[in-house]
Image (tube, rainbow, N blue to C red):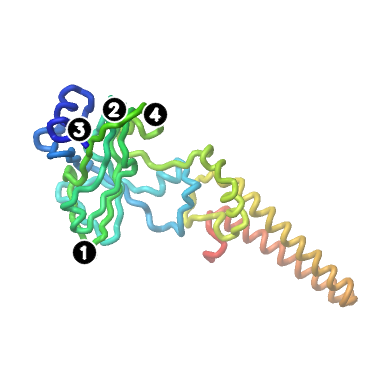
């Protein structure tokens, strides 16, 4: 881990560049570099997850859904009161550019605030070569009382470590993050979870996973499998009942009545399923 002297040298020589996303509040190395770390400030806005979802399928986050799921709020100068167990997502005010393969940053919360029950988690704890972005944070109030936080508050710290060996630069979606990017599940990632996908197909109550309607393309095919599964199951039930009445009861009137009732139930079940899927509501919510 690098000391204050080494960190300032890295900043002055341009090995590490730190800028502010708000030019009126520039990064100040004299005030923000401590004995062995760099204090980073909270950004000027944050996101909260809506609470009107039954649950969220972590393998089915599309761009449209992410925009509906996360609600953006702007800090005001009086701060924000974080309720117990409340969680918010926000960027740092600083943008860090790691220009050398010899160093990487490690992000953590500051001890003074963690002792109050305030947890700060970085969505990318290791900040390595190739990164030129803000740092996305997750802030949680674990205390039993509300805690007030402020924009530009120095809530997190960045340690600088030296790397031994060759390092490949990171060039993923978050490498040039200028503003907080919402999570999106890539279809290429979904394809690697074939077993999970099969279990979801078998779980009737979890194919449709939301209370409010949104455009969900990734799991559209699961709804098709769900319908097919219901039809096949109903056909098997008919076959079993027909066999029972035909072989054992030998009563034509009862056979016809049972067949009519079964057909009616199949029709009602299929229509109900179609309505539930079209509204984006799980069938166990009714």
**Sequence-wise first label, 2 or 4:** 2
Name above or below for residue 120 compared with residue 256.
above
Dot 3: element: strand
Residue at the far left: name it: 30
Residue at figure coordinates x 26%, y 32% from the top left: 162
Q: Which residue is mark 4?
A: 171
Q: Position of residue 27 (x, y in %)?
A: 15, 33
Find out whether the residues at labels 3 and 4 contact each other: C-beta distance under 8 Å: no
Find out whether the residues at labels 1 and 2 contact each other: C-beta distance under 8 Å: no
Q: Which residue is mark 3?
A: 20
Dot 4: element: loop
Residue at the far top: name it: 13
Distance of mark 3 from mark 2, alpha carbons? Answer: 24 Å
**Sequence-wise first label, 1 or 3:** 3
Residue at figure coordinates x 26%, y 49% from the top left: 120
Q: Which residue is mark 2?
A: 102
């Amino acid at each position: 881990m690098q000391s204050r002297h080494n960190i300032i040298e890295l900043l002055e020589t341009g090995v590490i560049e730190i800028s502010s996303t708000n030019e009126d509040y520039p990064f100040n190395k004299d005030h923000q570099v401590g004995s062995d770390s760099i204090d980073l400030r909270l950004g000027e806005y944050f996101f909260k997850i809506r609470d009107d979802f039954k649950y969220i399928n972590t393998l089915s986050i599309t761009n449209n859904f992410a925009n509906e799921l996360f609600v953006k709020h702007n800090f005001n100068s009086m701060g924000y009161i974080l309720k117990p167990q409340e969680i918010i997502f926000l960027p740092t005010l600083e943008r860090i550019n790691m220009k050398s393969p010899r160093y990487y940053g490690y992000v953590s919360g500051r001890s003074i605030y963690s002792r109050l029950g305030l947890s700060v988690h970085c969505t990318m704890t290791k900040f390595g070569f190739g990164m030129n972005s803000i740092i996305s944070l997750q802030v949680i109030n674990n205390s039993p009382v509300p805690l007030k936080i402020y924009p530009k508050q120095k809530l997190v710290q960045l340690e600088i470590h030296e790397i031994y060996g060759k390092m490949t630069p990171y060039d993923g979606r978050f490498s040039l993050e200028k503003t907080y990017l919402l999570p999106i599940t890539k279809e290429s990632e979904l394809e690697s979870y074939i077993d999970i996908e099969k279990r979801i197909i078998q779980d009737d109550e979890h194919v449709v996973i939301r209370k409010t309607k949104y455009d969900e393309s990734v799991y559209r095919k699961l709804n098709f499998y769900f319908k097919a599964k219901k039809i096949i199951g109903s056909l098997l039930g008919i076959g079993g009942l027909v066999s029972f009445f035909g072989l054992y009861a030998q009563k034509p009137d009862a056979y016809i009545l049972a067949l009519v009732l079964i057909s009616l139930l199949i029709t009602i079940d299929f229509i109900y399923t179609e309505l539930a899927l079209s509204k984006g509501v799980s069938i166990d919510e009714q």
